[in-house]
Every structure is written in C-alpha cells, then in structure tokens.
C-alpha cells in the first residue's frame, strides 16, 4: 500500500537534530515520518575513545589504593563513575568504596560537588582553582615515594603538575576520562550555522542546554555571528525537549516555538514537531 500524507506528515521538512545520547532513536523517528534530518555534533565533551586505560586506573586504585588522589575536574570523576556503572560487576561501588579513605585534593569546587554526589568529600581544596594552586598546596610536603593518582582534564597531560610531583619524588599515575571536541566537530557546527543562517531547515530541536551553549559559542567566533544566528532562529521553528532547555534558550534571547506539555522525552517532542510542521 503506498504511503499517504498521514504516514509521512513531515515529508518535505528538514529538521536540524543536535547530537545526543539518543540521537539515532530521535533521528529515526523523524525520518520515519518523512523528515530530512540534518545531524550535527553539539556536545563538546566525550568519553575517552579507549576506556581500557581509565578502567585500569580505577582497578589499580581499588586493588592497590593510591596514597593520595588529585581530582582536577568534576566532569572527570562523573565520567569515571558512569563508565564503572556501564562496566558492571560492582565496579562502581568498589571504586567509590576504595576512593573513600584515600586523601583527596580537589582543584576547585566542582570535583568536590561530584564527590558529594556519591557520599564522599574532598580532604583538601587547592588554595586556588588552578594547576599552580594545586602545586602551591602541595609545596613543602614530603612526597618522596608517595603514590599519587591524578585525574586530568581533557587530553592535556598537565606536564607542569606531573613534573612537579615526579620532581618531588612521587610516583604518579594519571588518567584522562574524557576528551574535548576537535576541529573536525567544530567545522561541522560551522556548517550547521551556515544552514541555519541560510534558513535551509524548517526547525531545530534541542535536547540539552549544553547544545544551546555550544552552538552560540561557535557562532561567536564569527563577526556578528551570534547576532546573525539569533536573527536566523527567529525565522526557524525552535523546539525544546523540556523546560530546562527552554529556559536556556529564552535566557539567550531565543524564542521557543514548541515543547511537550508534560512528558519531556523524545517521542512527545516528535509529536509536537508533527503537530506544528505536519
């Protein structure tokens, strides 16, 4: 039986869908309804592409606890915990239990907040939320032979901190649980902005506040890029999956054209898009 307009209510519509954990599911629901989907990575932080070194670091902390742990970001700890949860076999609980009694130094408040989420707390906070602040906090301590686990940020090896620690005689084990978006992804965001400025899409559907912030961050690199983008978005239907995303959009001066009324998930968002664009 041939498809009817009721089967493909979004036929002829092009919808920009920023990257999310459920991107494929969301995109497929729109494609089945006839939409042409423009996908784009609007997440600036990703898990480390190879999880094995991260898992090995966590298992070493469990089996041979470090004498000290330095946590530079809350993002890193959250991603380690999420990886341990996905790995199963009680790894997350074992990791949290082993981390508890180890003296923990945090670079700033965010790693401390991540610790408190799992019932732990930092033993010390750096005198300033920088690498230099961490070094200043540890200066004068006897670190000879001390085993220190260091959670890095992004792919930065933080040679300044590691060199200080090893120079003081410490044995350092680093872990990098996440990476930042690369130039290739930034170029993809630029292409999305080009499509939005040219009004080549009928709608853009945001599923996280992070996506909104990153889109505007990349737009700001252009001359008058943010103002031009905000102007273009006035002529495109802007969808938000829920009130948190909607609030972020409105705070940035972007009008929200549609949002599910009560159930803030992908399927209700698709229904709203069909209602408005179908």
Image: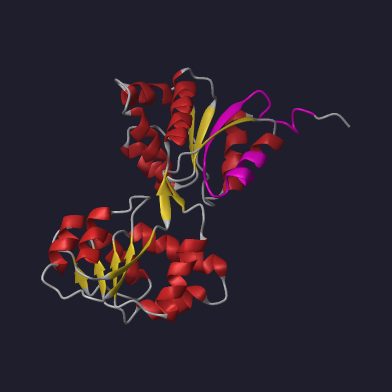
Q: Nearer the viewer, residue 212 or 273?
A: 212
Residue at figure coordinates x 37%, y 43% from the top left: 247
Position of 94 relative to 271 (above/below):
below
Q: Where in the figure is residue 256, as x and y percent of width and height? A: 43, 35
Position of 121 relative to 152 (above/below):
below
Q: Quadrant of the C terminus?
A: top right
Residue at figure coordinates x 75%, y 27% from the top left: 5
Left or right placement of residue 12 versus residue 122 in this view: right
Please check the rendered image and state whether residue 266 is part of the magenta-colored stretch, yes or no: no
In this view of the protein, can residue 102 be seen by the observer? yes
Left or right placement of residue 66 versus residue 132 in this view: right
Q: Nearer the viewer, residue 188 or 138?
A: 138
Position of 38 relative to 133 (above/below):
above
Residue at figure coordinates x 24%, y 69% from the top left: 105
Q: Quadrant of the N terminus?
A: top right
Left or right placement of residue 224 versus residue 270 in this view: left
Residue at figure coordinates x 49%, y 38% from the top left: 41
The residues colored magenta run 4-29
In this view of the protein, can residue 82 be seen by the observer? no
Q: Where in the figure is residue 165, as x and y percent of width and height? A: 23, 65
- Quadrant for residue 131, please give it: bottom left
Colour option used: secondary structure
Q: Where in the figure is residue 192, as x and y percent of width and height? A: 48, 27
Q: Nearer the viewer, residue 14 or 88?
A: 88
Q: Where in the figure is residue 81, as x and y percent of width and height? A: 44, 66
């Amino acid at each position: 039986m041939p498809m009817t307009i009721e089967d493909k209510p979004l036929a002829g519509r092009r919808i920009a869908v920023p990257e999310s954990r459920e991107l494929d599911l969301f995109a497929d629901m729109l494609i089945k309804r006839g939409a042409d989907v423009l996908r784009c990575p609007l997440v600036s932080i990703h898990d480390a592409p190879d999880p094995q070194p991260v898992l090995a670091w966590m298992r070493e902390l469990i089996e041979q606890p470090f004498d000290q742990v330095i946590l530079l970001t809350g993002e890193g700890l959250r991603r380690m915990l999420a990886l341990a949860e996905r790995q199963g076999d009680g790894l997350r609980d074992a990791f949290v239990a082993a981390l508890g009694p180890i003296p923990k130094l945090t670079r700033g408040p965010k790693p401390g907040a991540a610790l408190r989420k799992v019932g732990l707390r930092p033993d010390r906070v750096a005198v300033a939320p920088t690498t230099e602040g961490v070094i200043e906090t540890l200066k004068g301590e006897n670190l000879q032979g001390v085993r220190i686990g260091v959670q890095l940020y992004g792919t930065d090896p933080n040679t300044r901190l590691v060199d200080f620690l090893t120079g003081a005689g410490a044995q350092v084990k680093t872990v990098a649980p996440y990476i930042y978006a690369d130039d290739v992804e930034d170029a993809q965001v630029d292409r999305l902005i080009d499509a939005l400025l040219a009004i080549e899409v009928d709608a853009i559907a945001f599923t996280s506040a992070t996506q909104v912030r990153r889109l505007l961050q990349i737009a700001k690199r252009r001359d008058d890029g943010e103002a031009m983008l905000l102007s273009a978005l006035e002529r495109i239907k802007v969808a938000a999956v829920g009130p948190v995303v909607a609030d972020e959009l409105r705070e940035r001066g972007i009008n929200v054209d549609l949002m599910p009324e009560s159930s803030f998930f992908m399927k209700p968002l698709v229904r709203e898009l069909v209602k408005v664009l179908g």
